[in-house]
Image: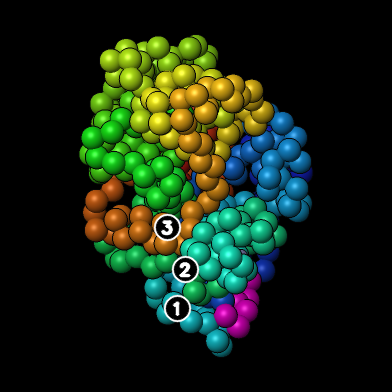
Amino acid sequence: MKAMRVPVFGPPDCLREDDIPVPTPGPTEALVRIHACGINRMDTELRSGTYGGEPLANFFFGKAIVLPHLPGIEPAGVVVALGANARGAAVGDRVVAHSHLSCGHCTHCRAGHDNACAEIRVLGVQTPDCGGYAEYFCWPADRLISYGEGLPHTTAAAVSVNYGPVWFGLMDQAGMKPGETLLVTGAAGGCGHAAIDLGRLLGVRVIAVTRSAAKVAALRAAGAAEVIVAPDNTPWSEQVLALTQGRGADVVCELVGAASWRESLSACAARGRVVVIGSHGGLHTTLNLGEVFGRNLSIFGITRAPHTAMARVMQLAEAGHLRPSIAATFPLSAAAAAHGLLETGAFSGKIVLTMT
Ligand SMILES: [Zn+2]
């Protein structure tokens, strides 16, 4: 089968088309023919050998990369074969993969927080030669989430890994409620659009922050009530305070990292909740702890989504309640061009590979 792999860390054109064997499903696994795979910023970071501008070793999952690396954490497709003891999926099912594997028996797994398992293995990160930039992948059948004919594979791929953690962070952890104000940084990316869309669905007022005036219309169309344009990380928290009569945002979906962290805390209301999902704009920052406890702030770190949250967002997508924004699609063989587009930042929404 065709697979786009990373033989050595480097720029987008280091992605190489390889012909590798179609994997054979293990006893409890399904073989899935991939039809689409979302491009995640994690993919481009792991390809470059850095995260947030720092060595991969500084990133929690960065030490696990084996070269040649087969990226792709967001595949969607159709089950074409099953192992002898596979349960939970049938041949012909349209499925996305739950984004990671976990032990299933530790206290976190038993409590439904499988994304906090110490033995977590993220698809396309810690699973050598198993990733979405290929024509097939194998995955435990009971860790697949099915969707119906009405949901295109490209949409399923765009929803699964972006919406899942955002749902978990905003709803299950931060307890976001209708009528509150949600601030979204890095709003033009896949998770940013997911946060805006879920805010729209819940009935919160969304304030989006982006670096480019060219993205304002797309962010408003996605559901942002206000869009703040802050090129080159110019300070913007005062604008949030002005828009909220000095109160600040109840919930901050922080998707940038060190480059926006200072502003995010300043823009947060008293008793505000900051949800951190990725930090591609820098891993290390400084923190005034007096501000955190003085204003009763809560900070939630989110990696991946528990199975329940991923299943929930796929149900919402299938029922037509979500409006994921697909910025562009590329054939698998053009993965380098897709990475190039993502790295320019000249898009708004989700970039998806297709394998038809
Ligand atoms: Zn576990």
**Residue pictured at 52% horizontal, 27% vertical:** 292
Describe residue 114's horizontal placement relative to residue 219 as left or right: right
Q: Residue at x 70, y 52 (%)?
A: 69
| Rendered view: 289 above or below 164 | above
Front-most of residues 148 and 319: 319
Residue at x 52% of width, y 14% of height: 232
Query: Which residue in the structure is indicated by mark 1?
Result: 88
Give residue 129's position: percent from left, percent from top. Answer: 68, 61
State the image coordinates of residue 59 (x, y, percent, origin top left). Answer: 69, 41
**Start and end of the magenta stretch?**
22-28
> Looking at the picture, does residue 88 appear above or below residue 230?
below
Q: Earlier in the sequence, mark 2 or mark 3?
A: 2
- Helix or strand or loop: what does disc 1 sit on? loop
For marks 2 and 3, give the one nearer the viewer: 3
Disc 1 marks which amino acid? Gly
Is 298 placed left or right of 213 in the picture? right
Cβ atoms under marks 3 and 1 closer than 8 Å: no
Say which mark, if any, is on residue 188.
none
Circle nearer the N terminus (3, 1): 1
Q: Are marks 2 and 1 in contact (CB under 8 Å)?
A: yes
Q: Amino acid at mark 3?
A: Met
User: Residue at label 2?
Assistant: 144
Residue 310: mark in rendering: 3
Instruction: Say what secondary structure mark 3 lies in.
Output: helix
Asked which colour scheme the image uses, the reply is rainbow
CA–CA distance in space, label 3 to label 1: 16 Å
Residue 27 in the image, given as x and y percentages of width and height: 60, 83
> Quarter for ligand 1?
bottom right
Along the viewing direction, whichever of 215 and 280 lies nearer the viewer:
280
Q: Is the CB–ligand 1 distance for label 1 below 8 Å?
A: no
